[in-house]
Image: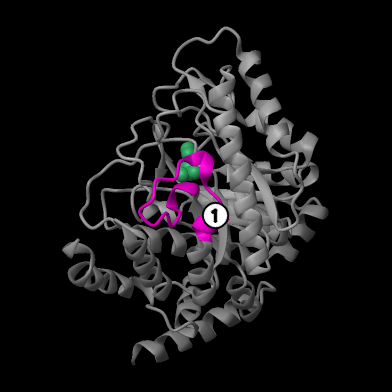
Amino acid sequence: MNQTDLIQKSYEIAKERYQAVGVNTDKALEDLQKISISIHCWQADDVTGFENLGNLGGGGIQATGNYPGKARNIDEIRQDIEKVLTLIAGNHRLNLHAIYGDFAGKVVDRNEVDPSHFASWMQWAKEKGLKLDFNSTSFGHPKSGDLTLSNPHKEIRDFWIEHTKRCRAIAEAMGQYQNDPCIMNLWIHDGMKDQTVNRLKYRAILEKSLDEIFATNYKNMKDCIEAKLFGIGLESYTVGSYDFYLGYGAKNQKIVTLDTGHFHLTESIADKISSLLLFTPEIMLHVSRPIRWDSDHVTILNDDVTDLAKEIVRAEALNRVHIGLDYFDASINRLGAYVIGIRATQKAFLQGLLEPISQLKTYEENEQYFERLALLEEAKALPWNAVWDMFCLKNNIAVGEDYIAEIQQYEKHVTSKR
Ligand code: RNT
Ligand code: ZN
C-alpha cells in the first residue's frame, strides 16, 4: 500500500474509533487548521539580530551551541523561514524582535527605531501570507546592564522607555498594515545577582516606566508583559516577576505572557490559564522547554505542552490565547529546531481538540470521578497520530519523519555553505 492510501485507511479507522467517544475528527482537523502559531524569528540566528552597532556586549540573554549555518542577514533569515513554512501546515505569524530591523547598513540605535525599518518585513510577510508580531529588545546593548526600565538612573531608564514606546508605534504600524492586531511583547531581564535589600524600589520604578510607556492608546496592536523566574547572573532578584506582571496586567488590563520556561519546574502552567482568563483580557504563550537552569530548549511534545493545549481547548479559549514559541538552540540544525517545535505544538493542540470533552465534562458534573479518570486514561492512547498524519497529507507537507530528509537537503545545499 502506498503512503497516501495507508494514511487514508488509518484515518478512517481512527475516525470511527473517535466517533465512539463522541469526537468528530473532521472538525478537529478544521479547528487545527485555524490555529496560528507565532514563530519566533530568533531561533534562526541565536538572537543576534541585524543591528550595525558593532559588538554590543551587554547580557540579558544567551544562546548556547555553535552549529554551523546560522542566518547572517535578512535575506538568509527570510530564506530559512520560507523553507520552514514548506514543512508545516497552517497559516502562521512571525514574531520579530526590534533588533531584526532592515537597517540597510546604517547605525540605528535602539532609541531611534521606527516603522520605516520594518517596512520591508511588512511587505515580505504580506507576500508570504504571514502576520507579524513584535518585541522590544532591551538585552545585548551597552546600556542593558542589569537594570533597564527599572533603572534608578533617569538617563538610562529614559533611553529604554523611548525604545519601548517606539516599539509600540512599530507594532501599531504592523497591525494597521496587516489589518490584524500585532501582539507586542515586553520582556526585560532586570534583576540583581545577589541579595537585594530594596526590592520594592525597583518594582515601583518599573511600574512607573510601564505606565509611561502604555500612556498612548493604540488600536492595531496589543501589549503583553512577560515575567521570568531569574536570569543567569541575576539569580537573586527579578524585578519583573510573575507576581509583578500578574498584578500589573490585572490592574491595567494588559495581556500577561506565560513563557513555559519561566516558572519553577514543578509549577503547572496549564493551571494558570483559567485564572488569567478571568482577570486579564487575553493570554500570550511562549511555548518552550525548561531544562534545569535553561528555559529555552526546543519545544517537544511532552506532558507540559499537551496539558497546556488541553486546558485551553477545555476552556474554549482558543480565541483568547495567542500561541507563540520561544526557544533558541544553537547546537542543532536551526531549521530542524523550528519544525520540531512547531509540529510538537500543533500535535499538542490536536490532542486537545480530540479529547472526549463533552463526555468528560458530563462525568464531572455527575460526580462520576472514577469514570472521568478512566476516560482520561483511555483517551491518551486513542489514535491521534492517524489524524495528525491526515493533517499533514491534506496540507501536502512531509508526513511523519519525512521532513528530516528535507532539512538535510536544505542543509547540504544552503546552510552548510554559509
Ligand atoms: C527571555 C524571554 C523572552 C526572550 C525573547 C527573545 O527569557 O523568554 O521572551 O526569549 O524575547
Ligand atoms: Zn519568552
Is the shortest distance between ligand 2 and the CB of mark 1 under 8 Å?
yes
Is residue 289 visible in this depiction of the protein? yes
Q: What is the x, y in percent for residue 132? A: 56, 61
Q: Is residue 165 above or below residue 175?
A: above
Label 1 is placed on what type of residue?
A: Gly
* Magenta stretch contains residue 196: no
Image location (x, y in percent) of residue 49: 38, 49
Residue 374 seen by the camera: no
Q: Residue at x 53, y 10 (%)?
A: 196
Label 1, on which residue?
Answer: 324
Is 214 rendered above or below residue 331? above
Residue 322 in the image, given as x and y percentages of width and height: 63, 56
What residue is shown at x 19% (from left), y 72% (from top)? 413
Mark 1 is surrounded, within 10 Å at the Cα level, by few (under 14), some (14 to 19) or many (20 or more) other residues, namely many
Q: What's the colour scheme?
A: one colour
Identify whether 274 is placed above or below 337: above
Q: Secondary structure at mark 1?
A: strand
Q: Residue at x 76, y 43 (%)?
A: 280
In the picture as drawn, the residue positioned furthest to the right comes out as 366
**Corner quadrant of residue 177:** bottom right
Residue 254 sits in which quadrant?
Answer: top right
